[in-house]
Image: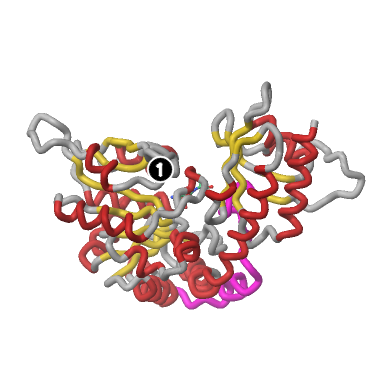
Amino acid sequence: MTHPKSALAEKPSETKPQAIIDLRSDTVTKPTPEMRRAMAEAEVGDDVYGEDPTINKLEQRAAEIFAREAAIFVPTGTMGNQIAIRIHTQPGQEIICEERAHIFNWEMASLASFSGCMVRPVRSGNGTGVITWDEIKKAIAPKIYYAAQTGLIVLENSHNMAGGAVTPLETTQEICANAKAAGLPVHLDGARVFNAAVALGKSVAEITAPLDSVMFCLSKGLGAPVGSLLVGSKKFIERARVYRKALGGGMRQAGILAAAGLIALEKMPSRLHEDHANAKFLADGVAQLPGIKLDASRVQTNIVIFEVTKPGVAAPDVTRKLAEKNVLASAIGPSHVRFVTHMDVDRAACARALDAMRAIFAN
Ligand code: TLP
């Protein structure tokens, strides 16, 4: 994924400078004034000793909201996923996930370096990114001593690189029931699980109930500056504390982060439908343009990924031209562009982004 930072240095063609519309990711949001106030006033203590009251409150609220025994605050989604993988697996095992999964493509091969595992990727047959039990079961290693054994299944909901695709609850239930019968744990990379819940019209507790563990991010669509949580059983979270420390994630007066995280957790899920509507608006407009392949009907959450099919034009050319018009997007490989909507881009900003796309693709 490339970000057109260098193009920012070039002067935009408009005479009046326009605000930058940053659609590269929902990670780019800035803390709200309420978050900044809460951070300034947060009660803190040493969290490695379990003495930060604001961290403790955030972990307790996360556990309650996900209807789990316990939760642990971690600095990043990557660390949360990697701790879960370390706990669920043994070195030499395989992890089944969809081929575009974040744990496979964007976590620095940490599942190999930290947990000694390999990925057995699964392609979703219908291209949606939502894998089914029928597809997963074919990837499970036969129980023979001379074949690497499957140790874990990881799902991603919503699925980032599959255009924010949402896994239906019935699919999660079917996978988890069969995995349980096969003695396999299932972890959810739920970086954007609140977006999935909004799209499904259900609570995060309901859509994640069948899973063994869940990681979710405060720092994506929920708008917190830093932080993710891992939720699961008491025993699982006790082990997670050990691995968090091993990875250097034992932070001290981190309540200043948790204070913003609490606002993200309590107040921000209720506005995510706006981001989804804006993504749909963008997708509907972009899908009309010549030289682009996009099925706008598949856009369910806050992510729009489209293919550039115009001859001689690569995705990085598009993001560079957009940046010249003060619209930032991410190129994913040579032919795909990603827009992510979030609380710092409103409908007017999306309309401007669409105008920029129209200007680029009209000629
Ligand atoms: N995603 C980032 C990039 O790393 C691609 C983004 O801009 O979307 N799981 C999923 C599904 C994610 O999308 C991400 C971040 C993570 C895990 C990792 O979270 P962080 O960045 O907090 O380590």
Query: Left or right: where does residue 353 sit relative to residue 92?
Result: right
Extent of the magenta region = 23-45
Q: Give the vertical position of 271 relative to 298 (above or below).
A: below
Q: Quadrant of the N terminus?
A: top right
> In the figure, residue 157 lies in which quadrant?
bottom left
- Secondary structure beneath label 1: loop
**41 relative position to 125: left or right:** right
Question: Quadrant location of the C terminus?
Answer: top right
Relative to 322, is 147 above or below? above
Which residue appears at 40% of the width and 54% of the height? 167
Where does the image place residue 113, in percent across and percent down from the top left? 31, 37
Most foreground residue, 53 or 175: 175
**What residue is rendered at 73% in x and 35% in y?**
7
Outermost residue to the left: 145
What residue sits right under mark 1 in the picture? 101
Which residue corresponds to the image point at 20% horizontal and 44% vertical from the top-left?
151
State the image coordinates of residue 140 (x, y, percent, origin top left): 20, 39
Residue 23 x/y as whole percent: 65, 49
